[in-house]
Image (spheres, rainbow, N blue to C red):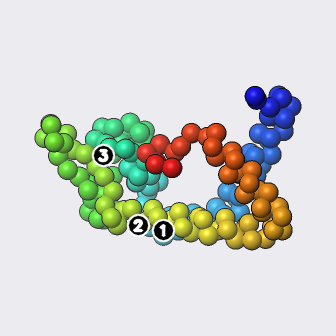
Amino acid sequence: MSAPDHVLDATATDVAAFIDRVLCATHATTADTLAATELSVSQLRMLFLLRDSAEPPTVNEVADGVALSVAAAGRAADRLVAAGLVDRREDRHDRRMKRLSLTADGQRLLEAHFQVHASAVEGLLAEMPAEVCARLHDGVTAALDYLPPRPGCVN
């Protein structure tokens, strides 16, 4: 059974405000981490797309996924390959197609970013009273059961 409209509206407003405050409070730390990589926004978007892909996508699929031309995506992929963050291989069935995937270094770079983000969020939660933090945990844990998983994720 779904909650009444007034409860949904109030909850949506509060959840959006909570997310906004968390993002604002952690933005500087996480943005600094990404800026230190000296990668372009398009290159970062490509890394996130590769992380979330169930199968290694083609350059064309990556271009579509990050709203770049195929040529621009190809150049960005070249730089990511040269940096050791992405691997480019021929498609098993069509050698004309190139498929991209994260290398171990690319995965470590993203994992380090998410660890910095998680630490920043943990710092915010540490400032909350234990009872509030416990209630938040219970509510978020229960809500996660009703949300779709992130694409490409097992959890």
Q: Residue at x 56, y 39 (%)?
A: 148
Most extreme residue toward the right is: 6
Viewer-proximal residue among 90 and 133:
133
Rendered image quadrant of residue 12: top right
Report helix, strand or loop for mark 1. helix
Residue type for callout 1: Ala
Q: Are marks 1 and 3 in contact (CB under 8 Å)?
A: no
Alpha-carbon distance for marks 3 and 2?
17 Å
Image: 56 above or below 81: above
Disc 3 target residue: 56
Report helix, strand or loop for mark 2. helix
Residue type for callout 2: Arg
Q: Are marks 1 and 2 in contact (CB under 8 Å)?
A: yes
How packed mark 3 is, by other alpha carbons closer than 10 Å (few <14, some 14-19, many 20 or more), is many
Query: Where is the N terminus found, in terms of image quarters?
Result: top right
Instruction: Look at the image and tell me whether residue 38 can be seen.
Output: no
Alpha-carbon distance for marks 1 and 3?
22 Å
The spot of residue 17 in percent (x, y) is: 77, 49
Instruction: Look at the image and tell me whether residue 115 can be seen.
Output: yes
The spot of residue 140 in percent (x, y) is: 70, 51
Report helix, strand or loop for mark 3. loop
Q: Earlier in the sequence, mark 1 or mark 3?
A: 3
Disc 1 target residue: 112
**Mark carried by residue 108:** 2
Image: 6 above or below 136: above
